[in-house]
Amino acid sequence: MPIVSRYSSEVRGARGTASRAGGRAMSEVQRALQELLSLDGRPWVVSCYQKLEPADRQAEKFRIKLKNRLRRAGERVAVLGHGRAEREEILAALERIEHFFQFPSNLEGARGVAVFAAPGLFRVVRLPLVLRSRVVIDRSPVVGELVALAETGTRLLAVVADRTSARLFDVGLDAVEELEGLVAPDATRAGKFHANRKSVPGVGEYRFHNRIREEKQRHLARVAEAALRAFRVRAFDGVVVGGIGVDASALLPHLDASLRDKVVGVLKLAPKKATPAEIREQALQLLAEVSDVQAAEAVAEAEALLPSGWATSGIEPTLRALHQGAVRVLIVDHDATVPGYRLSQSGRLTTSPVASRGEGEPVAVADVLDDAIEEALRQRARVLVVRGAMARRIERLAGLLRFRAGR
């Protein structure tokens, strides 16, 4: 019996997302979505997502873990219902993916990479972030993360300023563009006040420093106006500001209220010396740090709401709530692997091999956590991934609920 894709409904729903650029030039993620969603009639697709953040790159730890994931995926090919020829092709695709990650030049400038391999296809998409490293073999590409990125967006306006100038950057999913900047037209040369030898010592010093302060405030007000114009024209998703040392956040009080609500964080750097690549790397790192903070807050919220039934902790309770559409935030342990099953009629994920009445026979899946992520993304729930001590507090899977799910 042919295997029906677990993600077919998601693929159909994502077609509109890929075709909409919202008045912007299409990003690499959107272009990849268009291509991947046109893969009708393919017998199989390997979808590989790999995190490449600094912690993953340290001592190239990600290579060992990736190799193990590819090996486990290869071991499952025999039970997926493919013929011998197809199984050999899939194993060859897995080897090609492993070979791709052996070359550092293929991974430069990315904090995550998605690779999709199928007959006649080897598509690489560099990403600003990856939720969880995983390898999935299915009848259709696993594109939930790409859809989420295309819909929610991570396009940032970066504004870095000092006392006399400002630079603006359009930081996108896969590139950064420097926009037209500003230079203060009337800036007084900075430095210590030097009184005229014939005057009384200190006379004019107050006016000198006060003039510099006024010039700085006028300059930052102009920068804030330029930032607001750029934000409205290009429809950014967020704002980061930056500058030198304690002045890095000096622009914040001057921003329009609509912009202040969109501020992601503050970068500390030298505006005149910063390169576009440095701006992008620091902006994406800031996004990752914000995500970590939000994940920690979600874990604490789940612990507080668990007694009232507005949260779940543990694999089975969370999978059942997810099947009922009750999960608004799914919290996943990045490093856990939990083999399980999907019931053929209802589609519910479970770790139990026992068929439930009216839900069909259990079909083995390599990792119910990977499938849970895709299901949550399909339902437009938010997915947060935790590691280490934070992960040990959630029993591998947890959820914040839209409504209290039934048993």
Image (tube, grey):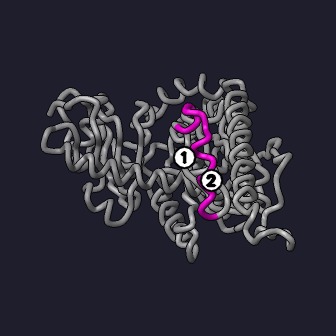
Q: Which mark is residue 154?
A: none
**Mark 2, residues whose alpha carbon is within 10 Å: few (<14), some, or many (≥20)?**
many
| Tag 1–tag 2 contact (CB < 8 Å) | yes
Nearer mark to the viewer, of 1 and 2: 1
From the viewer's perspective, tell me whether residue 249 is left or right of residue 330: right
Q: How many marks?
A: 2
Q: Per the image, is 256 magenta?
A: yes
**Can residue 34 be spotted in the picture?**
no
The residue depicted at 73 percent of the width and 56 percent of the height is 207
> Whole-percent x and y of residue 142?
53, 40
Please report whichever mark, 1 or 2, sits nearer to the chain's N-terminal start: 1
Report which quarter residue 168 is drawn in: top right
> Whole-percent x and y of residue 138?
50, 41
Q: Per the image, is 301 magenta?
A: no
Disc 1 marks which residue? 264
Disc 2 marks which residue? 283
Is the C terminus in the top left, top right, bottom left or bottom right quadrant?
top left
| Magenta segment boundaries in residue numbering | 245-260
Q: Nearer the viewer, residue 42 or 388?
A: 388
The residue depicted at 79 percent of the width and 51 percent of the height is 165
Q: Nearer the viewer, residue 213 or 124?
A: 213
Relative height, residue 168 to residue 9 (above, below) = below
Is the N terminus in the top left, top right, bottom left or bottom right quadrant?
top left
**Can residue 129 be spotted in the picture?**
yes
Relative height, residue 9 to residue 129 (above, below) = above
Report which quarter residue 42 is drawn in: top right
Q: Amino acid at mark 1?
A: Val
Q: Nearer the viewer, residue 259 or 127?
A: 259
The residue depicted at 73 percent of the width and 63 percent of the height is 205
Q: For the residue labelled by badge 2, is the local secondary structure a helix, a strand or a loop?
A: helix
Q: For the residue labelled by badge 1, is the local secondary structure a helix, a strand or a loop?
A: strand
